[in-house]
C-alpha cells in the first residue's frame, strides 16, 4: 500500500531486466506506472515479464488474482519518453550502464518533468553527481540514486544515495515512497562508484576469482560453498548481527593471539564489556540475548533442509 505521497504517476525509463520489475512494484503499490522503451518489441517483452512476475506473486499467495490484474492494468508501455515522463511525480531511470546515455536522459527529464518531481537512477556503478553535474540540469537537488538488486520485485533493498547537490527533502521523499510500496530503503549519505552493496559483492568476487585462478576451486565448488553455507545464514544475520551472535570477544581474541590489533570498533566494544548477544549489547542491543533472532535463523535453516 502506497503512502500519501501526492504522486499519481510514476515513470520507469528503461523497462528491461531491472526496469520491468521496478514498475511491477509501483503498480502493485497503486501507482499509475509508465514503461518507456525505445522499441515496441522491448515494451512487449517488458509487459510479458511483468505479467509473469505478477503471476508469481499470485502463485505464492502474496496477492490475489484480482489485485494482480489491477496492477497489470496500471502499467502503460510507450516508446515516447516525453509521454512517459510528462506529469510524473517520480521517475526511475534504469537504462544500460552507459554514462553518456544516462546524462542525456537526465538532461531531458529535467526539462519535461514537473519541477517538484523526484528523478532517480538505478545505476549500479555511477554516482548521481557524475550524471547531473555540468549537464544542463536545472534542478540537480531533486536527483538521487535509487539502486535496486536483481530481481528488483523480489528483493526488498534499495540503496538511496545522496549526491553532491541532492536535498535532504528529496532523500526523505524517496525513502517514504519506496517504504510505501514495501521496499527496504537504506539511505547512504556518501556517494562512491558502485555504492555499498556492489562494493561488498565486488570484494567477494575478487577473492572468488583468485581461488579459481589458483586452481583451489572450480566455479561449481564456489557456488556450492556459498549456497549451502553462509549464503543461507547471512539472509538472517547479515554481517554484524552474526558478529554479535558468535560474540565480539571471539574475533578480538583471534586478533590478539595472532599479534594483531583488533579492528577499532570491535576493540572499543569489547573493552567496554559489550560482547554481543551474550552480554546484551554489541553492535546492536539484545535485551533477549538474541533468542528471537537465533530462533528465526534456526527455523529458516530448517526450511532449507526440508
Image (spheres, rainbow, N blue to C red):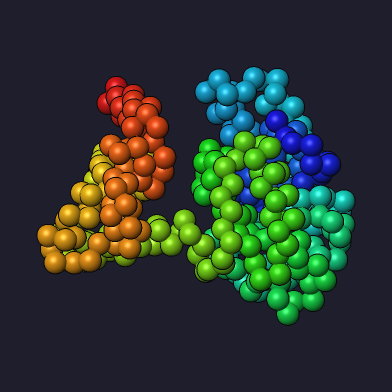
Which residue corresponds to the image point at 76% horizontal and 42% vertical from the top-left? Answer: 33
* Quadrant housing the C terminus: top left
Q: Is residue 238 left or right of residue 219?
A: right
Count of numbered badges drawn on the protein: 0
Q: Position of residue 99 (x, y in %)?
A: 62, 71
Q: Is residue 73 left or right of residue 130?
A: right
Q: Is residue 235 left or right of residue 140?
A: left
Q: Position of residue 147 (x, y in %)?
A: 58, 55
Name the one closer to the observer, 149 or 302. Answer: 302
Q: Position of residue 12 (x, y in %)?
A: 71, 50
Residue 75 shows up from this direction: yes
Quadrant in the picture for residue 54: top right
Q: Is residue 41 left or right of residue 219?
A: right
Name the one closer to the observer, 126 or 97. Answer: 126
Q: Position of residue 240 (x, y in %)?
A: 36, 48
* Quadrant housing the N terminus: top right
Quadrant in the picture for residue 62: top right
Which residue corresponds to the image point at 79% horizontal and 72% vertical from the top-left? Answer: 137
- Decide: is 241 above or below 132: above
- Decide: is 264 above or below 129: above
- Decide: is 189 above or below 88: below
Name the one closer to the observer, 139 or 107. Answer: 139
Which residue corresponds to the image point at 29% horizontal and 62% vertical from the top-left? Answer: 263
Quadrant in the picture for residue 5: top right
Which residue corresponds to the image point at 67% horizontal and 61% vertical from the top-left? Answer: 144
Residue 72 shows up from this direction: no
Q: Residue farthest to the bottom?
A: 134
Amino acid at each position: 500500500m502506497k503512502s500519501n505521497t501526492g504522486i499519481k504517476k510514476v515513470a520507469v525509463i528503461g523497462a528491461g531486466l531491472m526496469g520491468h520489475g521496478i514498475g511491477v512494484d509501483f503498480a502493485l503499490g497503486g501507482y499509475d506506472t509508465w514503461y518507456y522503451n525505445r522499441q515496441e518489441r522491448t515494451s512487449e517483452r517488458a509487459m510479458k515479464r511483468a505479467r509473469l512476475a505478477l503471476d508469481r506473486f499470485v502463485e505464492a499467495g502474496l496477492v490475489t488474482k484480482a489485485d494482480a490484474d489491477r496492477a497489470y492494468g496500471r502499467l502503460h508501455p510507450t516508446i515516447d519518453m516525453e509521454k512517459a515522463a510528462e506529469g510524473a511525480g517520480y521517475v526511475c531511470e534504469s537504462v544500460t550502464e552507459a554514462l553518456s546515455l544516462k546524462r542525456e536522459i537526465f538532461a531531458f527529464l529535467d526539462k519535461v518533468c514537473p519541477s517538484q518531481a523526484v528523478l532517480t537512477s538505478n545505476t549500479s556503478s555511477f554516482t548521481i553527481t557524475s550524471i547531473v553535474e555540468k549537464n544542463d540540469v536545472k534542478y540537480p537537488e531533486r536527483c538521487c540514486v535509487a539502486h535496486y538488486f536483481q530481481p528488483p520485485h523480489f528483493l526488498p533493498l534499495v540503496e538511496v544515495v545522496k549526491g553532491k547537490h541532492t536535498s535532504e527533502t528529496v532523500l526523505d521523499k524517496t525513502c517514504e515512497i519506496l517504504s510505501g510500496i514495501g521496499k527496504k530503503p537504506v539511505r547512504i549519505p556518501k556517494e562512491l562508484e558502485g555504492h555499498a552493496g556492489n562494493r561488498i559483492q565486488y570484494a567477494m568476487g575478487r577473492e572468488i576469482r583468485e581461488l579459481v585462478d589458483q586452481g583451489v576451486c572450480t566455479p561449481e565448488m564456489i557456488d556450492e560453498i556459498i549456497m549451502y553455507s553462509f549464503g543461507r545464514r547471512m539472509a538472517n544475520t547479515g554481517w554484524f548481527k552474526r558478529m554479535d551472535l558468535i560474540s565480539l570477544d571471539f574475533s578480538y581474541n583471534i586478533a590478539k593471539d595472532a599479534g594483531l590489533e583488533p579492528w577499532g570498533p570491535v576493540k572499543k566494544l569489547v573493552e567496554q564489556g559489550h560482547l554481543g548477544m551474550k552480554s546484551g549489547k554489541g553492535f546492536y542491543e539484545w535485551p533477549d540475548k538474541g533468542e528471537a533472532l537465533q530462533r528465526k535463523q534456526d527455523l529458516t535453516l530448517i526450511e532449507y533442509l526440508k
